[in-house]
Amino acid sequence: MSEPQIVWLRRDLRMADQPALHAAAQAGPVIPVYILDDERAGDHAYGGASGVWLHHSLDSLGKSLGRRRSQIVLRKGDAPQILASIADEVGASGIHAMRHYEPWWKEAEDELRDALSSLGGKNGKLCLYDGNYLLPPGSVTTGSGDPYKIYTPFSKAMMEVMPPRDPLPEPETLSSPDSWPESDALEDWGLLPSKPDWAGGIRDFWEVGEAAAHERLDWWTDLVGDYDEGRNLPSDDITSRLSPHLHWGEISPAQVWHKLKDKRSDGWKTYAKEVIWRDYAQNVIDQFPEYPRESYRDYDERTLWRNPNAGHLIREDLECWQKGMTGYPIVDAGMRQLWQTGWMHNRVRMICASFLVKHLLIDWRFGEQWYWDCLVDADYGNNGVNWQWISGTGVDSNMFSRIMAPLTQSEKFDAAGYIREYVPELAELDDSEIHDPPDEKRGDYPVKMIGHKEARERALEAYRASKP
């Protein structure tokens, strides 16, 4: 029998169009390994909602492998050291992995090469493959050969080289080693909350795993034509909800693109640009690894932002936003949907983010961290790029002076049904009142934290003062 091949799994939890798994299966017996290496990511270790999704995704992939008489070896700790140890134990001739662009994973890949070299090179080499994005970050460049910083020209350049490569099928055969390394039990990792179990809304809202991702894509194929207009209507929710499946690699963007590429609707054209946005975000963090932690533009942060760590009143403002108790129904509906389901409608994500950084003048990084903890699709690149876009601090961002009006947005995009679902204390109000309830009909629902006009004027004044 040929030498075993390790497949290092991270956010690539699928059987089909998984180049690392495909290559390993052709080379010898396959040992899939997933290592929970939380400390490496620091403040971007998986949040609570991500942990719930990860548990169910690993469980689903494990069952798929089980039908092939295979399994996932689960370990917890330092990924490079554990992988090198397993390679030495089983005599693996290769470690195959999908390439990742978060700075801690790039660091881990370098450390793994060093760890394998320290074993004398006899226990395998690290083989990295692309496939989690339409194209590898940095492969689409400007005329001068530099990576793009601005989305629009990047998107145009991407469209010129689409479609992406054809997706790979599942491996035809998947051989197992003579013996398996020891594995943790998934349940022992404690990814699922129990005291209390706050994940019921996530379980009710989502089906997790590769099969569920393809079922969702099949469903979306019939609706994508309505996306151009429907994407802005939270009550109807004409969105794919594929983002967590793409984030965790249960489906690849190439699979999505090839499924939809023959559509001729405006909806598909708009949706294609958002699939490209995932690639754009990775291009940004590939150039600026600390982008989700550090503002790109120069300004006086002390002048612009109110720091929740500097006083209890500002901290209370942040907590009201987190709990969906701002007095703005569209904002509160979004924040409560986020807490209950681990996801938020895209239009409402922007409204809620804008409210935090412009109405409350709270540093965008507090919002980035809250979304990181609460979103099942929390992505280092997407989350950071989106927050810097809305806060006006990014390499390519909305102007800070463009301040979204939540009440106007709510009425314009017909959010009444959405508000009734997630802010049930207002459910009896009619459409003419529910977007901005009169004080006498609010009941226990809070009054506005700050008026829109007052917030706008305060934000613009702070912005002017913060400019160098």
Image (cartoon, helix red, strand yellow):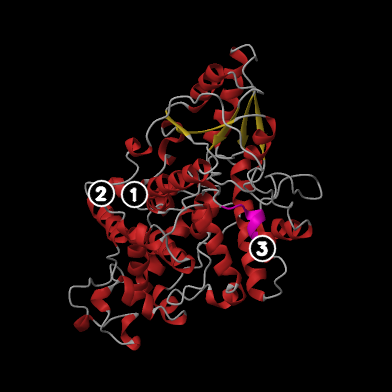
Q: What element does badge 2 sit on?
A: loop
Write down the residue under mark 2. Answer: 311
| Quadrant of the rendered image containing residue 163 | bottom right
Q: Nearer the viewer, mark 3 or mark 2?
A: 3
350 and 201: which is toward the camera: 201
Please check the rendered image and state whether residue 319 is part of the magenta-colored stretch, yes or no. no
Residue in view at x 19 percent, y 83 percent: 440
Distance of label 1 from label 2 (alpha carbons): 7 Å
The amino acid sitting under disc 3 is: Lys
Query: Residue 186 placed where, x, y %?
Result: 38, 38
In this rendering, position of residue 362 left or right of residue 247: left
Q: What element does badge 3 sit on?
A: helix
Distance of label 1 from label 3 (alpha carbons): 46 Å
| Quadrant of the rendered image containing residue 422 | bottom left
Q: Nearer the viewer, mark 1 or mark 3?
A: 3
In this rendering, position of residue 460 left or right of residue 442: right
**Residue 386 in view of the camera:** no
Query: Residue 360 placed where, x, y %?
Result: 35, 61
Q: Earlier in the sequence, mark 1 or mark 3?
A: 3
Number of other residues with Cα within 10 Å of mark 1, as a class: few under 14, some 14 to 19, many 20 or more = some
The secondary structure that most of the magenta stretch takes on is helix
459 above or below 56?
A: below
393 and 245: which is toward the camera: 245
30 and 302: which is toward the camera: 30
The amino acid sitting under disc 2 is: Gly
Residue in view at x 53 percent, y 50 percent: 247
361 above or below 329?
A: above
Write down the residue under mark 3. Answer: 259
**Residue 178 in view of the camera:** yes
